[in-house]
């Protein structure tokens, strides 16, 4: 509404449509009518998303194909602002309708509570993409202030701000410099810039998720975990069980499984995987770089499935464990090139120069670079502790916890970037 007040009607319209359709689905006993209401809800909601997010991209792509064949067709172009959070609340609302259709929950009769589910402010603009089965029951309960939840929520918020302003925004200064002139940098610089971006996007989105979950927790609500130390994953399959979990599980439940999942032939299973990841890439943005990014990750899934490569369960075998993590990290970083590049030509340039452009390492602002490394070291230390020691109940004493969070606050204030841009995932 701050950008375009009339856009508030979009989320209201989406809320009304999914509420009415789910209500009718719940009442109807005839399967054809139930399916008709479901399809209507899906088409209307994704139709709005298509117009605002994908219309110009698809018409431009079709125009380019026809133009190369010598056919000139004019498509009207709409200059529209992309409403903040439209992909997130659309997926959340449509997921609710599908859950009611599958009889996994009863329709919420209280319109206000359902509207709150669609527009719950902590996670409205960038997730986690919540499930009605988790959040709606919490809205039906009387919420009283809980001191322990408030403390836990505050801790999550502090950690989220550290991830955002100390790590993500510090690294953004460097990665933006590299990728804005990708053809002018050496191989080592592009490699470091890509590694920095891998942690930038993790801390940018993971930081937002932590803040959102913390805000909700202070108010007495539990949102689902969205990140679980993804760069400790040993395979691409495991990576997507740790990265943007709410979206990964959404695509699994509402795209991959309806396509047949793994209950079909191996060839069809691989097809289902590839299509799911292509759609996931397109969800992230109306650009071929995102589609290719999704396709690359889909190929990773297929190859690892064919080779039957699975994570090592023996953490004590340090060599195998580190080899798996390192290999997976390299693969994920390669795919991030397409995600970060401003265009396909920039992505191809980055890849080619990685192998063909020896030269000096560009550090840029030395102090800022050092601050980014300090933030990265703290991040890796925290994730390492959570991954290997937390579950073994090697928990620090209260005074150590207090010192830790005080230290985080000091780092935020001393080396944080407070004039950085918005969260990366706001654009999706």
Image (cartoon, rainbow, N blue to C red):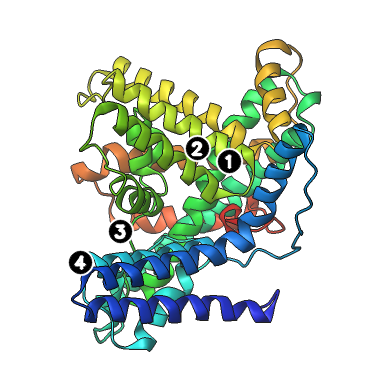
Element type at marker 2? helix
Q: CA distance from mark 1 to mark 3?
A: 44 Å
Quadrant in the picture for residue 222: bottom left
Q: In the rendering, which numbered label is found on residue 398?
A: 3
Alpha carbon distance from label 4 to label 2: 29 Å
Q: Which one is earlier in the sequence, the residue at label 1 or at label 4?
A: 4
Q: CA distance from mark 4 to mark 3?
A: 42 Å
Between residue 149 and residue 251, name the one nearer to us. Answer: 251
**Mark 3 falls on what kind of element?**
helix
- Disc on res. 60: none
User: Which residue is at the front of the view, 168 or 19?
Assistant: 19
Residue at figure coordinates x 52%, y 61% from the top left: 87
Q: Which residue is mark 1?
A: 290
* Residue at 20% over, 73% down: 30
Crowding at dot 3, Cα within 10 Å, few <14 / some 14-19 / many 20+, comes out as: few
Occupied quadrant, residue 209: bottom left
Q: Which residue is mark 2?
A: 294
Q: Which mark is residue 104?
A: 4
**Location of residue 145 with respect to 408 vertically, above or below:** below
Position of residue 99 measured from the top left corner of the image (x, y, whole percent):
27, 66
Q: Nearer the viewer, mark 1 or mark 3?
A: 1
Picture coordinates of residue 369, whole percent (x, y): 68, 36
Tell me if label 2 and label 1 are in contact, CB under 8 Å.
yes
Q: Position of residue 303 (x, y in %)?
A: 37, 22
């Amino acid at each position: 509404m701050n950008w375009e007040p009339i856009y508030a009607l979009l989320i209201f319209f989406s809320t009304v449509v999914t509420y009415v359709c789910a209500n009718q689905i719940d009442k109807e006993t005839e399967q054809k009518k139930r399916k008709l209401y479901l399809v209507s809800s899906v088409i209307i909601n994704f139709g709005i998303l298509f117009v605002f997010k994908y219309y110009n991209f698809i018409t431009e792509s079709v125009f380019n194909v026809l133009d190369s064949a010598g056919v000139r067709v004019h498509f009207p172009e709409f200059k529209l602002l992309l409403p903040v959070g439209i992909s997130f609340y659309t997926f959340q609302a449509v997921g609710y309708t599908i859950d009611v259709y599958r009889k996994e929950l009863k329709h919420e009769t209280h319109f206000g509570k359902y509207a709150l589910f669609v527009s719950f402010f902590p996670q409205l603009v960038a997730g986690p993409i919540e499930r009605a089965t988790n959040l709606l029951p919490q809205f039906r309960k009387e919420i009283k202030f809980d001191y322990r939840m408030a403390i836990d929520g505050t801790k999550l918020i502090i950690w989220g701000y550290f991830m955002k302003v100390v790590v993500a925004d510090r690294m953004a200064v460097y990665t933006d410099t590299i990728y804005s002139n990708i053809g002018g940098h050496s191989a080592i610089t592009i490699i470091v810039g890509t590694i920095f971006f891998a942690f930038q996007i993790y801390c940018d989105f993971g930081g937002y998720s932590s803040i959102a979950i913390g805000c909700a927790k202070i108010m007495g609500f539990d949102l689902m975990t969205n990140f679980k130390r993804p760069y400790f994953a040993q395979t691409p399959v495991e990576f997507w069980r740790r990265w943007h979990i709410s979206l990964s599980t959404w695509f699994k439940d509402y795209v991959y499984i309806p396509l047949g999942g793994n209950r079909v032939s191996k060839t069809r299973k691989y097809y289902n995987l590839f299509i799911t990841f292509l759609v996931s890439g397109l969800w992230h943005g109306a650009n071929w770089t995102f589609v290719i990014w999704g396709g690359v990750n889909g190929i990773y899934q297929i190859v690892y499935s064919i080779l039957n490569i699975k994570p090592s369960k023996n953490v004590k075998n340090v060599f195998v464990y580190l080899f798996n993590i390192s290999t997976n990290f390299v693969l994920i970083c390669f795919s991030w090139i397409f995600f970060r590049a401003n265009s396909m030509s920039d992505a191809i340039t980055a890849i080619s120069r990685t192998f063909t452009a020896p030269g000096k390492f560009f550090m840029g602002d030395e102090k800022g670079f050092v601050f980014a490394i300090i933030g990265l070291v703290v991040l890796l230390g925290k994730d390492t502790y959570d991954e290997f020691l937390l579950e073994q109940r090697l928990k620090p004493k209260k005074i150590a916890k207090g010192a830790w969070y005080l230290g985080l606050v000091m780092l935020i204030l001393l080396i944080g970037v407070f004039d950085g841009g918005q969260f990366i995932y706001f654009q999706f």
